[in-house]
Amino acid sequence: MFSAAGLLSVIARHWSRRDAVSLALFPLSLLFRLLVAVRRNAFRAGLLHATRLPVPVIVVGNLTVGGSGKTPLVIALAAALAGRGMRPGIVSRGYGGAAASPQAVRADGDPGQIGDEALLLARKSACPVWVGRDRAAAGAALLGAHPDCTVLLLDDGLQHYALERDCEIAVEDGRGHGNGFMLPAGPLREPAGRMVDARVINGAQQDIAPGSGGSQRFAMRLRTRRLYRLDEPGHDVDPAVLSGLRLHAVAGIGNPARFFEQLAAAGLSVVPHAFPDHHAFAAADLRFDDCDAVLMTEKDAVKCERFGRTDLYALEAEADIDPALIELILKRLNGRTPA
């Protein structure tokens, strides 16, 4: 018997193509599209209430289900805005965590409580980070605790219309929009032509032309920064040290193949093991035969540190973004109507 998540995982195998399964589900996707449109128009018409916070809000999200590189982009944007003299704060749903009411995220927090992405944001952004199911309430709580904050970054909130925003950024990767259908027949949460201020293409190998319909397009690349052992995060490890060892790699992210490709680019040959996004790793998940070391993403590492093993390694990556994206954001914020 499938759980809802398990059933969705099975259906997701058909999202990259138009086949008998996706076509059979297409009528449901039309219903979903209608419900999405009704909800969005209800917020536009004021039938559903949206909160306006006293500082600008930048939303980073997806049009599709699954991760595409939002977290490293949020970290890069926070650093870029801080470099322009702003004081960013970050708000996240805390997906995968148990927290419901707004709460601050500490660098030594429990990922089971506040979520893996939120913990990673708190460790790497040097910004105050708050989580909560109600993102407007979490943003207000953050501003109450940090009144010097001058801008908020909302991680994965493109469809959270209960919080008004000043700039919308949709992140995509090589998977694009899959078969182009909306849920459950395809991966789209909203129509592919949905207007945003910017579309950031993760993995673009060169500068990309502007998109149609008013959405500007920008390239983003994930660059490998360093490799480290989970029990000694302050010490860099030369990948050459692992050469010749029996290596396995795990990835509980939206696009595991992207991580495995990063390892190959770093000269590391591994046996790959893909897990669902936000997978809650147990010690048994990392036990492999003929294994000298296990490599993983930083997002997975925050959940595996507690195992206390000396053969677990994380690959740290950071986003290189087009400076023109920052200029676009600042242009949008400068035209903001005061709350």
Image (spheres, helix red, strand yellow):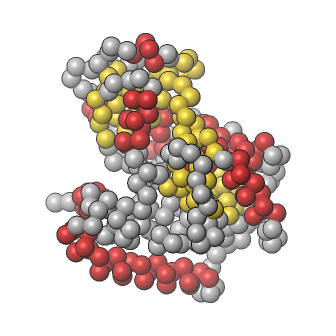
Residue at (35%, 35%) from the top-left corner?
250
Count of residue discs: 0
Is residue 212 toward the left or the right of residue 327 in the image? left
Residue 65 in which image quadrant: bottom left
Taking the spot 75% from the left edge, 48% from the top edge, the residue there is 81
Residue 124: % across, % down: 62, 37
Nearest the camera: 209 or 292? Answer: 209
| Image quadrant occupied by the N terminus | bottom left
Q: Is residue 144 above or below residue 256?
A: below
Q: Is residue 144 above or below residue 87?
A: below
Residue 78, x across and y down, in percent: 69, 46
Residue 264 point in image, percent of width and height: 39, 29
Write down the quadrant of residue 183 in the picture: bottom left
Residue 234 appears in view: yes
- Residue at coordinates 50% horizontally, 22% vertically from top-left? 228
Above or below: residue 111 compared with residue 33: above
Q: Using residue 128 as the reference point, say whether residue 172 is left or right of it.
A: left
Could you tell me if residue 309 is visible in this image? Answer: no
Instruction: Please tell me which residue is depicted at 65% across the width and 51% down the height of the picture.
Output: 90
Q: Position of residue 230 (x, y in %)?
A: 47, 24
The C terminus is located in which quarter? Answer: bottom right
Q: Taking 259 as reference, is 284 left or right?
A: left
Q: Nearer the viewer, residue 297 or 3?
A: 297
